[in-house]
Image (cartoon, rainbow, N blue to C red):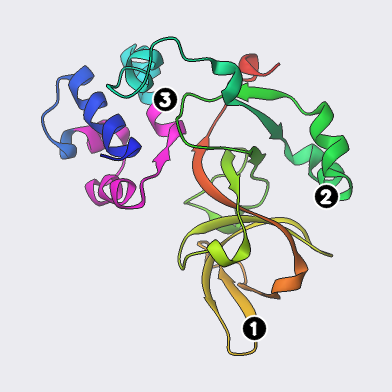
């Protein structure tokens, strides 16, 4: 069973719910949205954590109590660099220097995560909201899959988040926005300096940063 299915199953147990529809209503999402989380094996951590706070659910009970996870987990290995909007120009110019001074946060997830970037543009709204952080894993370009979300460091453009659509016969990559008021993006492969797949979304409490 996937991590996402484990979390959803455990959350229903902690709430005393038997079906996904009840959970979706409490999460303030549509039932088919919850189904898409399962299919894509991804979670909206901001939604999950906000619900846990409202219902006074301990995150350790939700994320750490699984048959295949030990109770003596070292959270040090889950500490991820947080690149805010204010520091993305610095990251674009010198990622090593920026990463050395960036704050960190330990995320309650088993997913492999390399970096967390703050969203500063509305082009992916309502899927991604401005000020949220996307939890990302660095990948190679050939690992991209159609209709998945990616964050990219692009030469001459900066740090952008888009949904990958397809490759053209000319070797260009076509990305689309979820917000129809924004234009789509067509770039060449060599323009991408770094690319990250998005594993989750998080609205952090500033007190958790160190």
Q: Is residue 56 left or right of residue 15?
A: right
Locate residue 143, reporting x and y percent.
54, 62
Q: Which residue is mark 1?
A: 171
Secondary structure at badge 2 equals helix
Q: Which residue is depicted at the point 39% across and 14% down?
A: 60
Q: Is residue 142 above or below residue 151?
A: below
Q: CA distance from mark 1 to mark 3?
A: 42 Å
Locate residue 35, reporting x and y percent.
25, 49
Secondary structure at badge 3 equals helix
**Is residue 206 a member of the stretch shown in magenta?**
no
Q: CA distance from mark 1 to mark 2?
A: 25 Å
- The image quadrant of residue 52 is top left
Estimate how packed mark 3 is, as few (under 14), some (14 to 19) or many (20 or more) residues with alpha carbons within 10 Å. Answer: some
Q: Which residue is mark 2?
A: 92
Q: CA distance from mark 3 to mark 2?
A: 31 Å
Q: Is residue 15 above or below residue 138?
A: above
Looking at the image, is mark 1 or mark 3 earlier in the sequence? 3
Q: Which residue is depicted at the point 27% across and 38% down?
A: 5
Q: Please tell me which residue lies in front, 141 or 135.
A: 141
Q: Which mark is residue 207?
A: none
Q: Is residue 79 left or right of residue 165?
A: right
Residue range (magenta): 23-49
Q: Which mark is residue 50?
A: 3
Q: Quadrant of the N terminus?
A: top left
**Is residue 36 a member of the stretch shown in magenta?**
yes
């Amino acid at each position: 069973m996937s991590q996402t299915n484990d979390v959803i199953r455990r959350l229903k147990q902690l709430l005393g719910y038997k079906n996904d529809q009840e959970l979706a209503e409490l999460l303030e999402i549509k039932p088919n949205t919850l189904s898409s989380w399962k299919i894509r094996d991804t979670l909206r951590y901001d939604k999950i954590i906000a619900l846990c706070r409202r219902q006074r659910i301990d995150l350790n009970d939700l994320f750490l109590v699984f048959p295949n996870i030990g109770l003596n987990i070292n959270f040090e290995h889950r500490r991820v660099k947080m690149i805010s909007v204010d520091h993305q120009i610095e990251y674009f110019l010198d990622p090593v220097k920026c990463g050395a001074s960036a704050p960190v946060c330990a995320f309650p997830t088993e997913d492999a995560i390399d970096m967390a970037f703050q969203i500063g543009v509305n082009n992916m709204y309502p899927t991604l909201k401005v000020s949220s952080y996307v939890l990302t894993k660095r990948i190679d370009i050939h690992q991209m899959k159609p209709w998945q979300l990616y964050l990219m460091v692009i030469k001459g453009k900066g740090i952008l988040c888009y949904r990958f659509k397809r490759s053209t016969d000319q070797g260009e990559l076509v990305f689309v926005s979820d917000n129809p008021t924004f234009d789509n993006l067509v770039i060449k492969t060599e323009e991408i300096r770094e690319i990250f797949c998005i594993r989750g979304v998080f609205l952090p409490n500033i007190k958790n940063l160190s």
